[in-house]
Structure formats: structure tokens, C-alpha cells
Amino acid sequence: MAFTIMAIIVGLIYLAILELSKNMIIGWVIGIILIVGFIALRFFLKSKEKNTKGIMTLCWLGFFVLLIVNGIVTGPPEKRVPAVANSNPEVTSVVHVNEGDLTGVYNADKSVKVYAGVPFAAPPVGDLRFKEPQPAESWSGVKACDEFAPMAMQERSNVIYNSLSHILGWHDYEMKIGDEYIEAMSEDCLYLNVFVPEGYEGQNLPVLFYIHGGSLNSGQPSYTEYRGEDLAKQGIIVVNCAYRVGVFGYYAADDLKAESPNGTTGDYGLLDQIAALKWVRDNIASFGGDPNRITIAGESAGSSSVNALCVSPLTGEMFNYAIGESSSIVEYSPYHTFRSYEEALEQGNIVRKEMGVSSSADLRNIPADKLLKNSSKQNAMTIDGYAITEMPYKTYERGANHEKALLNGFNAKEADAFMLGYEATAENYEELLSEHLGSHASEMAKLVPANSPQRDQHFIIDPLGDAKGALCQVYSALWFTYSHYVWTKCLVAENVPVYEYYFSKTNNILSNYHAGELPYAYGNLWRHPGLYDDEDYKLSEIMQKYWANFVKTGDPNGEGLPYWPKVDADNKQLLQLDTEIKTIDDPNEFMYPVIDAYQIEHKMQ
């Protein structure tokens, strides 16, 4: 009996591992056969002889070896993700773009057409690695654009760890048939997706062009939280694109600058975004869109990229409005996603040294998966002299930025998820602040003491105070909210319409942490059944209308919506997006003078 119980426990644990690691169904079948067979073998041997201890030791060893081999052999295959969730979707009529003819697919209720995996540039492989994106190649026949293209090359998280994060963190894990795969990944990644609402033929619809986040070293446009299927129903076309990330997108070297006809290096991912935007300008009319009514949008590193597009000399007439969520690079010394050219070169040197080569040309011969394995930091744009020609704040000081209106903002707990590895105490609190505030850390510690009572948006949750919570509060301002304060202030000085929000809605999944607003604004709450309530869906409907109205007119306001006032010389309040929507003062504004002082001292030239 003890043996049977032990074998069943081992078997259940093994099957749980197969589920978490997304092994193929055949792996489950083989695993169950091995478990049942092993138990049967035990009873068979027991019936033949009394002393089976030595034999069973060998059987246990063989059992574990077979389980491990099965787990490896039946591991999840790479697979391209379907463009829509419904099975056997209806195919759209043919659309002609500059490179050829293509079709997409309809979603379940045929309210939106989705064209996924549309190439906007040539594959950046071989000799095109570390070069500006080249025009997409033409094709013959009709291309079926019914699956999302592979994500850009990046470090892939462990499948079991990813599953556990959805169980313990996001609380949205589901056991289901059909998810036994991992999303395809390839250096051949320069594709975009187009979401077109049905029933608007001939109306020249405005376009939202979305850039995904991921710290410029991860992410993909197929991510469910910002798919454009539902937002498109508001009467706009939504486009999102991939771009090279990490070492493939932001590696810099002088020999690459010398070989480039544009004298550029270090901003390949940004140039990919610009190439995608140009493709949209050239082709969106074929989908029913207006190339002269484009709004660029992004979140986190995608928002920093939006800010870069606003100052790039290459994008002057390519869009009208901008939406930035939870990041920018307009500070005197941006805390992330931007670096000096000298620092970019230093990090490039690390890549060549660790790969054992002396030139960037040699790096083109190294397999993509091996090139990923380096310790350099390749998650920041730089002043390359082509895509970005000066510090972004200088472009704003000259009034040479491109956005004609801006919708931007941040969430209540932006930094918390990034601070999980920090251990903050009253004793080391000021030292941790000094990492990004230098000599101004003590001043900030007086404003936000280590024993500050910690709150959510509605009530005190820790009246005794918590150094970790205080640190998260300060770093949320440093890394995220301050940049929006500066961006907004720049546009107010230019008399450009700007609308700023503060997202604080709590829920059972992403809540009001970094990226928590995305499924609300882009209409993807329904992808997480049971984790959002009626209040969430009501807020999402309002936010989608705000975003769509802004894309259409540069003003988020519209009939039936709570009024969202512009930030200007007479009004500095933000719009709080929560169960109750109202105007409030920036909750972090009291910290900004200290950050201002630090920024002035560390101004990048």
C-alpha cells in the first residue's frame, strides 16, 4: 500500500509538472502509461518473489529516467499564435499593399478584421543584422495573415516559472487543451498587426499605432493585454508592431556607424518602429485608414519610444497625436531606456569581448541564440546622430517636437513589481535612495520617511510604516511619474493640448501596478474571466472611449463621459481613473522639487 501511495504521489507531481511546463498531450499519455505500468510491475514482481528490494531500487531508477526523458522529448513546441481566439475563422476579402495581396480573418462575431504577421521590412538576418531596416520583399499570390509572427529574439523565461507567476501573481492561470506550446521566436521578426472594425467602409478611419513595452529587451505585439481587437470597435484602426530588442536592437559600435550610409548605430529597434510607421503611412489606406490621422501610442519602454518618435527628425509629418503610458525620456537625465553614446559603446565592447570577436562583422556570424548570452545591458536608446540627434529635452526646449496633442499618465504603484528583489529597512533606506538621488537622498528621506504609513488609494494599510513601501513610493516617482510631470510641463509651455491621468483602480489581477491600465484602455478585460467585476468593465468602456476620442480629435472628451480637463497654466490637476473618475492633484508632486535638483546637477548634454 505504501508503495502504491508513493507512486501515485510521484505520478501526480509529475503530471502537474507536465501541465506547468506545457508539455504536449502525448507526454501526458506516455506519463500516465509509465505510472500505471510501474505500479503494475511492482505487483507483478511481488507475486513472483518475496524479496524485491534490490530489483525495485533499479525499477525506481529506471522509472525516474523514463519520466525525465519523456518530459524532455515531449516538451512544448514553438508555435505561432492564431490571430483570433475563434476556431476556423472566416477569411477576409483580399487587401492589396505595396508588397502584394493579403487576407486576414474575422473575430468571432465578425465585428473586427485582424491581419496578423504582415511584413513591414526585410528580415534583419545575416548581413542585415545591426543595419537599418530594409524595405519588405514583395510576394506573389495571396499571403494569409492569420497568425501573429514570431516574437523578436529575447531571453525566454522558464515555462514553469511563467506558469507559476500566472498562478501566484496574476491569478489568471487556466488548465485547458490547446495551450501546449510556447510562442515562436525568431530574429526574423519585423511584422505588424492591423485590427480593422467592420462596417466603416469608405470612412477613412483614424489610426492608432501602438508600440509594446518590455524594457527594450523583451515583449511582443501579440500580447493579449494590448491587442487592438476590441478598441477597434470604437471606430478606429489599431496597428501594433514588433521591433528588434536587446542586443539585436540596441547594440552600438563605431565600426557599424562607419559602415552605415546614415552614420547610425545603437538605435536599430527605434529605426524598426519608424519603418513600421512609414509602412502604415504608405499602406493603411488599403485597410480603410487615413494616413494623415495617425496617433502613436505605447506603454513603458513603448512610451519611451513614443517620446523618441516625438523628437526624431525622421518622423516630423508621420503622425499627429501621441499617447504615452508610464514612461518617457524627456528628463535632463532619463532614469531608464536612454543612455549616452559613450555608454552604448562601452556595452557594445562587452558583447564583442564575451563573444570572442574583434569586430561587429564577426558578430553577424554568431547564431542568434548564442548572441543573446552576454552580460551587457542593451535596453536603452542613444544619440546616434540620425534617429535621435540631441538630448530629447533640448528638442522640447526648441519647440521642435512633433506631437500636436498628448494623452499621458501613470499608475498608482508603478515601481512595486520592479522592487521585489530589494530588501529595504530603516537602516539602509537612505542608502537605497542615494542610488538614484545622490546627495539629495537625505532630503527625500525627510519627505518620505522609512516609517511613512503606507496607503492604497482609499485607506491606510500599514499605519506603522514600511521601508519597502516607502522605497516603492519614491521609486515610482523617480522611474515613472516624474517623467510625465516633465513631459506635460514641456507641452504646457508650448501651449500644446495635454491630458494627464492617474490610474488607481484595484482588481484581482494586475491591479494598479505597472501595466495594470492596459487591458482597460485596450478593451481586453474579457480575456480574464472572473477576475474583473462590473466596475472594471464600466471603467474600461470609459477609458476606451477616451483613447478612441483622442485618436480621432486630439481631445479625449465626448458625449456621456466625465469631463477630462487639459493641463495648462490654470489647471495642473490630473484625471484619476478609478471607480470614481475625478480630477486630483498629482499625488507625487511633493517629491518633484527634490528630483528636479538632482536632475539639474546630472544634466546630460
Image (cartoon, grey):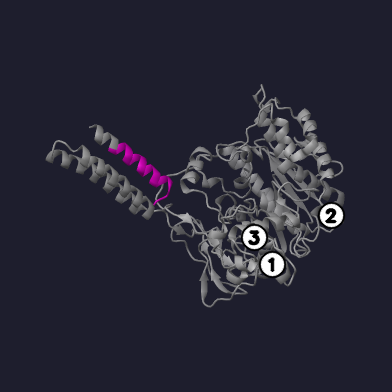
Front of the two marks 1 and 2: 2
Circle 3 crowding by C-alpha within 10 Å: few under 14, some 14–19, many from 20: many
Kindly identify which numbered label has been placed on residue 420.
none
Circle 2 crowding by C-alpha within 10 Å: few under 14, some 14–19, many from 20: some
Q: Is 235 left, or right, of 159 in this rendering?
A: right
Front of the two marks 1 and 3: 3
Q: Secondary structure at mark 3?
A: helix
Q: Which residues are magenta?
A: 7-23
Circle 1 crowding by C-alpha within 10 Å: few under 14, some 14–19, many from 20: some
Residue of label 2? 394
Residue of label 3? 249
Tag 2: amino acid: Lys
Tag 3: amino acid: Gly
Above or below, 309 relative to 512: below
Residue that appears at 67% across and 51% down: 301
Towards the viewer: 58 or 122: 58
Upstream in sequence: badge 1 or badge 3: 3
Q: Secondary structure at mark 2?
A: helix
The answer to whether residue 566 shows anywhere in this view is no
In the image, residue 426 lies at what x, y percent? 69, 26
In the image, residue 4 lies at what x, y percent? 25, 36
Q: Badges 1 and 2: C-beta atoms under 8 Å apart?
A: no
In the displayed image of the protein, which residue is found farthest to the bottom? 140
Towards the viewer: 383 or 120: 383
Residue of label 1? 278
